[in-house]
Image (spheres, rainbow, N blue to C red):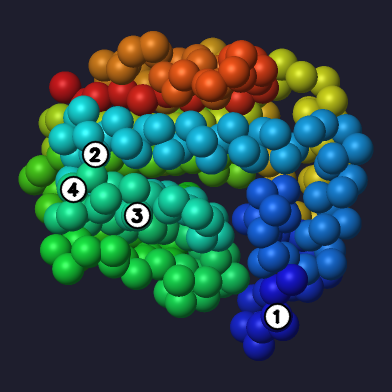
Amino acid sequence: MADSSPDPRINFGVPGAARIWNYWMGGKDYYAVDKQAGDAGLELYDMRAMARECRQASIRIVRFLAGEAGIRQFLDIGAGLPAMQNTHEIAQSIAPECRVVYVDNDPVVLAHARALLTNTTPEGVTAYIEADCHDPDLIVSDARNVLNFNEPIAVMFMGVLGHARSFEAARSIVARVMDAVAPGSYLATNEANDTNEDFTTLCANYEQTGAVPYVPYPVEEIRRRFDGLEMVEPGLVPVTDWRPEVPEIGSPTPMREVHVGVARKP
């Protein structure tokens, strides 16, 4: 379990999304309040399965972007706590020169990122920005110190936009970042939706803890953030359906509570 931190911004009485997610993923970087909230969530919905499927989809997406799409720059907004096969590790294993910028505003996430996320190749670059997703102009400004915005960039919002203040705020955040990147850039997102009553109840209960709320989106609202972009096949689909790898036995259980999409800026 995570050690105590002197950072005054950490409220040990309020659960944190990244730390709860780490608990569901089987990690050790969380506090007692995070485990309590995580266990309460598991009584309503199998969040461990959701966390696992979202992580696997993120890995497949980065492989596609660095491999088939030829992207060499990544802006991972709302990166969360380090896990196995992080964005820079996957991208740099495919193309050693990849440059990756992680963005988060959780001091625990940033402390772990600086300690654990380092380049895997001499040619690559891995950097971190402390910023809130509600300040896309700051994110773009700081990212320009590492990334070349005249060349394509993969912009990743993986499970973070449900924390936006409103659907309109989420669309604005995406639009402002995508306006800043060059043609040929990509947008990749995964986001939980409102199709499962147990999951929406989980989110409502989570808000009552005093933590930053997570609001499940209607699927059509998730789709709107791709307006003006060219969707990559198979389009906006459940997380288990986005280019799944062929399993050795059987097939993955469909998970329609999370939708994933990747699109190219023309």
Q: CA distance from mark 4 to mark 2?
A: 7 Å
Q: Residue at x 44, y 62 (%)?
A: 131
Instruction: Look at label 1 and name its amino acid.
Output: Asp
Q: Residue at x 18, y 48 (%)?
A: 95
The residue carrying mark 4 is 95
Q: Position of residue 246 (x, y in %)?
A: 47, 19
Q: CA distance from mark 2 to mark 1?
A: 35 Å
Q: Position of residue 30 (x, y in %)?
A: 72, 65
Instruction: Look at label 2 and name its amino acid.
Output: Ala
In which quadrant of the rendered image does the C terminus lie?
Answer: top left
Q: Residue at x 27, y 50 (%)?
A: 93
**Mark 3 or mark 4: whose residue is earlier in sequence:** 3
Answer yes or no: is residue 161 visible.
Answer: no
- Mark 1: few/some/many CA within 10 Å (<14, 14-19, 20+): few
**Mark 1 or mark 4: whose residue is earlier in sequence:** 1
- Mark 3: few/some/many CA within 10 Å (<14, 14-19, 20+): many
Q: CA distance from mark 1 to mark 4?
A: 35 Å
Instruction: Look at label 3 and name its amino acid.
Output: Glu
Q: Are marks 3 and 4 in contact (CB under 8 Å)?
A: no
Question: What's the mark number on residue 89?
Answer: 3
The residue carrying mark 1 is 3
Question: What's the mark number on residue 66?
Answer: 2
Q: CA distance from mark 3 to mark 2?
A: 11 Å
Q: Secondary structure at mark 1?
A: loop
Q: Position of residue 204 (x, y in %)?
A: 82, 37
Q: Secondary structure at mark 2?
A: helix
Q: Secondary structure at mark 4?
A: loop
Q: Are marks 4 and 2 in contact (CB under 8 Å)?
A: yes
Answer yes or no: is residue 236 visible.
Answer: yes
